[in-house]
Image (cartoon, grey):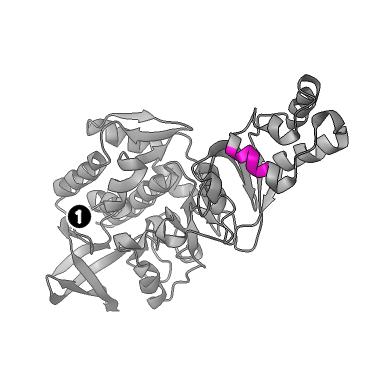
Amino acid sequence: MTYDTLILGAGAAGMMCAAHCGGRVLVVDHAKAAGEKIRISGGGRCNFTNMFAEPANFISGNPHFCKSALARFTQWDFVAMVDKAGIKWHEKTLGQLFCDNSAKDIVKMLLDLMAQAGAELWLETAVEEVSREGDLFQVRLVRSGRSMTVEAKRVVLATGGKSIPKMGATGIAYQIAQGFGLKVTDTRPALVPLTFSSQPFAGISGTAIPGRVRAGNGSFDEAVLFTHRGLSGPAILQASSYWTEGDSIHMTLCPENDWMALLRQARTDTPRRQIGTALAEHLPKKLAQLLDETWGLQDQLANTTDKRLSEVAALLADWELTPTGSEGYRTAEVTLGGIDTNGLSSKTMEAKDVPGLYAIGECVDVTGWLGGFNFQWAWSSAMACAKAIAAEG
């Protein structure tokens, strides 16, 4: 069996590429159904792109690499596909676009496009080995318990990263890439909750507040959620992509508040209150109580100097915390790092030194922010690859 293009992975990038690259195409995936990560995304409604997607929303060893693909297939190009398929959508917040009905609508759209293009799909099929003889790739597969070898002019790596292993994620794309001499950057979980071994927030688990979280050179204003094991919520997930183990994060509680002004006003209005009690007017009571115990805020406001109020305001505006780890790939939405972009063409996604070998989507060292950006990278990188393949004929 010889194909023009063999795509490994029936996720967002793999299906998008298969629907548009032309020729005789085979897509293989170990899962029982295509697009499983699409199906569970966005609470089952799929945050399929972001209105504000641009290169600045992506992390990579080469921040310029993603520019070409994103410019040539934009979020509005994908929205046009969604509209053409009759899928209703809405903006939830911060430019995040979701299906009105179900993420399954996006999966069906991609499967329909694949069918129209005549692409074959083999599910519950494992990849054993990828090698090359002459002009053809030899790919050994196991399907229905039977080993077989498929030949292809081109192989596209679209198997994703290591995130959510319970869905079968293995990082096989990295192994195949390395087998052909491509470099792979260090990988780690991203868009993931952060943990603390002492579980300091177990008593206020479920409490959420607006926050500004800074880690490395990333800063995000969104909700922070205190959990039994540590911290989560959009601001934390975003910052986790910029955090490295051993480093601290800095959190501003309710960044719109002028804490010094509020504390001074409380001293004027309710001088007999303690500082901690005054904070409970502006923070969830459980959190205020925790801060009271942690920072020793039992001082009576009437007896509190501006210097002391300034110290408390500074803590609220810049709470330094050092996580001991993260929830890991088990709950990480994506994998940071991947196939080194220096070995790929930014225009075609083809390996520079291995003609016919392509890499797209999450397995590449391009990681988007939370909010539909990673799906947009899947669509854009897949289309860059597909158009290059189609142009070859």
In this picture, residue 32 sits left or right of residue 99? left
* Residue at (75, 24) in percent of width and height: 266
Q: Measured along the vertical axis of the image, is residue 220 above or below residue 247?
A: above
Image quadrant of residue 72?
top left
Specify the principal SS of the magenta part.
helix
The vertical placement of 328 against 276, above or below, is below
Q: Nearer the viewer, residue 32 or 257?
A: 257
Quadrant housing the C terminus? bottom left
Q: Is residue 98 visible?
A: yes
Which residue is labeled 1 in the image? 33
Q: Position of residue 242 (x, y in %)?
A: 58, 54
Q: Is residue 322 left or right of residue 366?
A: right
Q: Identify the image quadrant of the N terminus.
A: bottom left
Residue span colored magenta: 286-291
Q: Is residue 137 visible?
A: no
Q: Name the outermost residue toward the top.
A: 269
Q: In the rendering, at what x and y percent does residue 319 appear? A: 69, 46
Q: Amino acid at mark 1?
A: Ala
Q: Residue at x 87, y 37 (%)?
A: 307
